[in-house]
Image (cartoon, rainbow, N blue to C red):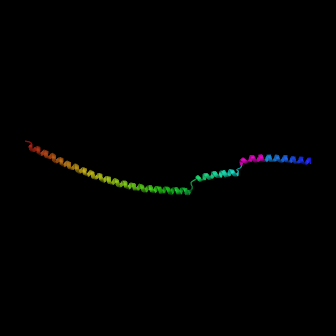
Amino acid sequence: MDEQITQLDRRLTSVEKEVTVLAAETASMLPRYATKEDLAKLDARVAIIQSNYATKEDLAALDHKLSARIGVAEIKLSGDIAALDCKQSADIASLRLQLAELELRLVRWLIATVITTSGVVVAAVKLWP
């Protein structure tokens, strides 16, 4: 019986050594392989990165939104330009009218000055001996 116990003890010792060797080999292999937890963490990180990506639908929606805003801005700008053009035309017409009135006033002043000067010259000639 002692011999059987000794054999079992040897087998147990050899099995323990093999288990230790296998545990060491497994421990040395673990850093080279990914675990399910590692894959789950990686999937979570990839999901976060993908959520930050713009899809074609996002770009199409943004393009549509920007096109609409540009269209509204063009319409507003066209209206503003037309209003400015109308105001400018009115200002030019007003300036032309004022210029014509000023020219008429200067012509009247010139005629009055010529008549007055002529009257003074005629009076001076009549009074001259």
Q: Residue at x 75, y 46 (%)?
A: 27
**Where's residue 12, x and y in %?**
85, 47
**Where's residue 35, x and y in %?**
70, 51
**Where's residue 57, x and y in %?**
55, 57
Q: Residue at x 65, y 51 (%)?
A: 42
**Where's residue 15, x and y in %?**
83, 48
Farthest left residue? 129
Q: 118 or 83, which is in the foreground?
A: 83
* Magenta highlight range: 23-32
Q: Residue at x 30, y 53 (%)?
A: 94
Q: Main secondary structure of the magenta part?
A: helix
| 28 is within the stretch colored magenta | yes
55 sits left or right of 24 in the view: left
Q: 115 or 50, which is in the foreground?
A: 50
| 106 is within the stretch colored magenta | no
Tally of marks = 0
Q: Quadrant of the C terminus?
A: top left
Q: Dividing the picture into quarters, in which one does residue 77 lie? A: bottom left
Q: Residue at x 27, y 53 (%)?
A: 97
